[in-house]
Image (cartoon, helix red, strand yellow):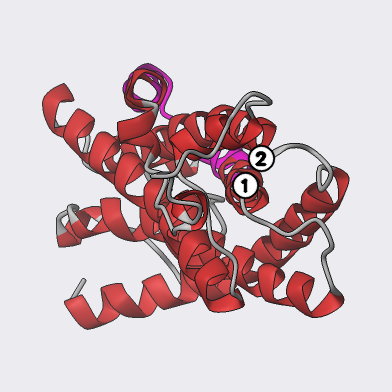
Amino acid sequence: MSITERFKHIWIELKAHSPFTLLGAAAGIVFMLIFKDISKENALRLFAVFHPLHVVLSAMVTAALFKLHRKASSFLLILVIGYVGSIGVATLSDSILPYLGQSILGATLPTHAALHTLDAPDHVHGPDCDHNHGHEPHLHLGFIEEWYLVNPAALLGVLLAYFWPQTKIPHAGHILVSTWASASFMLMSSPEQMSLLLLAGMFIALFLAVWIPCCLSDIVFPTLFLRADGVHIGHHGCVLCGKKDPAEKQKPTDEHDR
């Protein structure tokens, strides 16, 4: 398969997964409306739950897809692909893109330390206190700030994929959990009153934050490291869901397609 054909199939995958991602983004908005009254600190706790879970599912799909289509790979190589693909893309999906989306919408995220400081009832502003420090934009990076949760989550996902290489169920859960993680991030700096215009902007931000990174992690990233003869994707042939082009039904399939 040539590079042009490979990118053509990647685009087919992106289009095929956009309807499900739209539903995921809508679920993210419902999630935000349900939890809109929680404190910023509790929103951070939600992020600390859903982001590591996202990393587990992302690592499972990335490592499993790579292992299934390149069976001769060593565990170390699968570990590297699964770790980089999950940590890098989950950070992009759950933190970087939502942060950029909120910046465009005019929302900013208080620093991790400021969350605790501003919630403290006995906090007193001294003469040298910077009253604006709690509202400066801050990029919350889970693999650094919750390293003890996120990095082991990536390792767990790779181990599960190595011994139980499945893609369909983890991929579906990956998109939904990723939406909740991104929504939790946004809740950490969202205003108490959400207008329809703000919700519409957050819907677009959630869609882009999930659609592009999740497909990058589950499809594009591992596919780039496969040999050309190891990639088998037909027209609308989802390497995760197992859908095939009707014209290819008579072609032999590998063990994953049976």
Residue 143 seen in render: yes
Task: Tell me the SS state at disc 2.
Answer: helix
Provide the major secondary structure of the magenta segment: helix
Query: Magenta stretch?
Result: 153-173
Above or below, 166 relative to 220: above
Please check the rendered image and state whether residue 170 is part of the magenta-colored stretch, yes or no.
yes
- Farthest residue in the front direction? 127
> What amino acid type is highlighted by mark number 2?
Lys
Above or below, 78 relative to 171: above
- In the rendered view of the protein, which quadrant contains the N terminus? bottom left
Find residue 9 and report its image quarter: bottom left
Q: Which residue is mark 2?
A: 40
Task: Tell me the SS state at disc 1.
Answer: loop
Q: Position of residue 215 (x, y in %)?
A: 45, 59
How much space separates mark 1 and mark 2, taking CA atoms? 5 Å
Whether label 1 touches label 2, CB < 8 Å: yes
**Residue 91 falls left or right of residue 118:** left
**Residue 257 falls left or right of residue 29:** left
Q: Position of residue 172 (x, y in %)?
A: 62, 45
Q: Which residue is mark 1?
A: 188
Within 10 angstroms of label 2, few (less than 14), some, or many (20 or more) residues?
Answer: many
Tell me how many marks there are. 2
Please check the rendered image and state whether residue 236 is part of the magenta-colored stretch, yes or no.
no
Q: Position of residue 173 (x, y in %)?
A: 62, 39
**Residue 67 falls left or right of residue 166:** left
> What amino acid type is highlighted by mark number 1?
Met
**Residue at x 45%, y 34% (from the top left corner):** 113
Q: Position of residue 179 (x, y in %)?
A: 63, 51
Above or below, 135 relative to 236: above
**Residue at x 30%, y 76% (from the top left corner):** 7
Residue 123: give its label.
none
Q: Which of 201/79 is in front?
A: 201
